[in-house]
Image (tube, coloured by chain):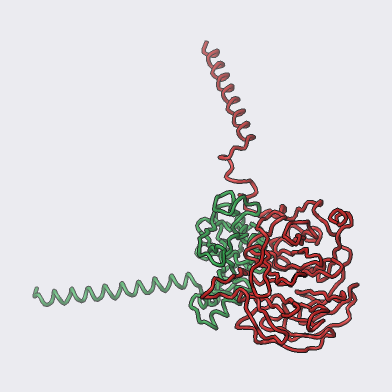
């Protein structure tokens, strides 16, 4: 009798245990919200950046056609002239290359350059090369001879980009978060974005030393406002005409605190942007609509483990330029080379 | 016994007591400070932030239950950004402080609103060292942008083992001994900025930072 009762007891315990175990299994499989405070990856003590590496191959609308070295250890700026001549700065040197990548000239510079710009053939002073330094701009002729040095740009200026327009030269000063409108002698005529006690002046948000400026085909001044994750268009008198861009970790938007780091404008008004941190080069229509990707980290040979690296290339950015043929010229600061991308014919056909 | 003798003894006793207490306090303070800061010949373990890759081994390899490694912030390098990649998970759903949007597994990064300027909201990011486990996840995220966050061994926690267990497991040999008088190491850029501040503006906080930092 006692044995029978014991057996029944064990049976009940076994049945209950089975039921409880099965319930727990079902609950665990259902992954209810209270079990996880967030996605597993988000709460993990190690950061997984593989999601940022992945770019849908269908979005890639450009292909690399050329690559050539620039013979600089730390290249930082690229510009292309109307005839296709390339100007690359880095270390303490300007390197002039042909479209095919043959180096024709190496010009020593006084100090470490930060950026380079070149004027077009129809401008008042054609084929002038403007090289930015921490607080000055050197002007060279197309052969690399020093013509002028602009040193009166303001206190603690940090020149990060130079764009030549038909009537003025625009200099981006990241330290003071202003775009300087200069005449061809280097005299500062206006400061776009300067704090104004009387008027509610437009201001730029520049959290790091990446602040780019360009002149569009319609002669508007185009400025990357990195802290706002926008590209803004101003009339020559400094009036904000339009802007576009949004912040997102998705490929359509600009990543993180401050992007795009660099941008260029193709002859048809299309924008090419280069982002720091995630190494994405993308194209947007003239109105800012996302068109596709030129290259992502995988196309640039960057491994997932290198994203967020404390040293270069973690903090390196890739400057970008666009030539008259609509090609994208990317200065790969990691491999110290220029990569040329051309639009895929199929994609181009679809677009046109 | 006459009263004047009694008064004299009391005074003597009180004076002697104060002298002994003062000497003991001075000795205790001196000993404590010497123990805390160490002498020039003594050394402490420290991470070189320029070599650190924020691999998260600091969180688990330390002999202490709660690692002696903590994240620190160099505010002079920080952009006070609204979207901080050291705070928000790369796959954040919304720009707010909800736990699912935060990157830190222990919510140790504190986001505080500072001001609204030029149409943007600016925030200060500080580390709650009580919650920080030294995993370096925020450090790696921040390195995508400005790189103002970095890891340091905190000497109020470190027991200064003969052989640092984190140092043994560090894949980049970022941990080495530094002078106990300068037991912290700055990031290269942070060091430059702080030295400039100390020399040009004579800021006391910058001078303290420079005084306690070893050259990388």
**In this image, B18 relative to A43: left or right?**
left
**In this image, A96 relative to A278: left or right?**
right
Q: Position of residue B55 (x, y in %)?
A: 66, 58
Q: Is residue A320 above or below residue B203?
A: above
| Residue furthest top in the image | A1
User: Residue drawn 62% across and 28% down?
Assistant: A22
Q: Is residue A56 above or below residue A270?
A: above
Is residue A95 among what the camera can see?
A: yes
Q: Position of residue A220 (x, y in %)?
A: 71, 71
Q: Position of residue A221 (x, y in %)?
A: 70, 72
Is residue B181 among what the camera can see?
A: no
User: Residue drawn 65% across and 51% down?
Assistant: B91
**In this image, B210 relative to A326: left or right?**
left
Q: Position of residue A32 (x, y in %)?
A: 59, 37
Chain A image colour: red
| Residue furthest left in the image | B2
Chain B image colour: green
Q: Quadrant of residue A181?
A: bottom right
Residue nearest the viewer, comparing B58 with B89: B89
For the N terminus of chain B, the image quarter is: bottom left
**In this image, A280 relative to B91: left or right?**
right
Q: Is residue A35 above or below residue B5?
A: above
Q: Quadrant of residue B18?
A: bottom left
For the C terminus of chain B, the image quarter is: bottom right
């Amino acid at each position: 009798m006692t044995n029978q009762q014991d057996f029944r007891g064990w049976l009940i315990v076994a049945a209950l245990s089975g039921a409880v175990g099965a319930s727990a299994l079902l609950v665990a499989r259902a992954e209810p919200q209270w079990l996880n405070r967030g996605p597993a990856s988000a709460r993990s003590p190690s950061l997984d950046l593989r999601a940022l590496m992945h770019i849908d191959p269908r979005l890639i609308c450009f292909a690399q056609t050329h690559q050539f070295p620039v013979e600089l250890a730390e290249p930082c700026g690229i510009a292309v002239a109307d005839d296709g001549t390339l100007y690359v700065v880095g270390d303490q040197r300007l390197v002039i290359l042909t479209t095919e990548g043959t180096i024709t000239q190496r010009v020593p510079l006084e100090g470490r350059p930060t950026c380079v710009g070149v004027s077009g053939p129809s401008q008042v002073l054609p084929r002038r090369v403007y090289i930015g330094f921490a607080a000055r701009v050197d002007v060279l002729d197309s052969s690399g001879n020093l013509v002028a040095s602009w040193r009166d740009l303001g206190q603690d200026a940090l020149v990060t980009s130079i764009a030549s327009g038909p009537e003025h030269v625009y200099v981006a000063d990241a330290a003071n978060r202003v775009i300087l409108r200069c005449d061809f002698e280097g005299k500062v005529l206006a400061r776009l974005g300067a704090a104004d006690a009387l008027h509610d002046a437009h201001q730029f948000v520049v959290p790091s030393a990446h602040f780019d400026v360009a002149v569009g085909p319609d002669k508007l001044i185009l400025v990357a406002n990195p802290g706002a994750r926008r590209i803004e268009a101003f009339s020559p008198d400094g009036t904000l005409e339009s802007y576009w861009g949004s912040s997102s970790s998705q490929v359509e938007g600009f990543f993180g605190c401050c992007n795009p780091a660099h941008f260029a404008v193709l002859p048809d008004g299309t924008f090419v942007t280069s982002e720091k941190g995630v190494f994405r080069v993308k194209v947007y229509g003239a109105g800012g609509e996302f068109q596709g990707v030129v290259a992502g980290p995988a196309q640039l040979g960057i491994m997932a483990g290198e994203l967020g690296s404390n040293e270069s290339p973690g903090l390196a950015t890739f400057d970008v330029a666009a030539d008259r043929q609509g090609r994208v010229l990317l200065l790969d600061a990691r491999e110290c080379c220029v990569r040329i991308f051309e639009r895929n014919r199929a994609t181009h056909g679809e677009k046109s | 016994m006459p009263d004047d003798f009694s008064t004299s003894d009391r005074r003597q006793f009180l004076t002697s007591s104060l002298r002994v207490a003062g000497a003991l306090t001075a000795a205790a303070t001196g000993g404590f400070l010497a123990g805390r800061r160490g002498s020039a010949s003594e050394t402490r373990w420290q991470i070189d932030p320029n070599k650190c890759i924020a691999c998260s081994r600091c969180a688990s390899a330390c002999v202490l239950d709660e690692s002696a490694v903590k994240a620190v912030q160099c505010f002079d390098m920080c952009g006070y950004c609204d979207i901080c990649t050291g705070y928000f998970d790369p796959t954040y759903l919304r720009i707010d402080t909800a736990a699912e949007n935060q990157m830190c597994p222990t919510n140790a990064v504190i986001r505080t609103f500072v001001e609204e300027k030029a149409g943007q909201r600016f925030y200060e990011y500080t580390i709650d060292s009580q919650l920080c486990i030294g995993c370096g996840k925020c450090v790696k995220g921040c390195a995508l942008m400005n790189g103002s966050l970095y890891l340091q061994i905190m000497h109020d926690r470190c027991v200064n083992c003969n052989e640092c267990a984190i140092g043994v497991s560090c894949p980049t040999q970022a941990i080495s001994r530094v002078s106990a008088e300068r037991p912290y190491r700055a990031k290269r850029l942070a060091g430059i900025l702080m030295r400039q501040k100390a020399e040009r503006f004579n800021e006391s906080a910058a001078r303290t930072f420079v005084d306690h930092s070893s050259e990388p």
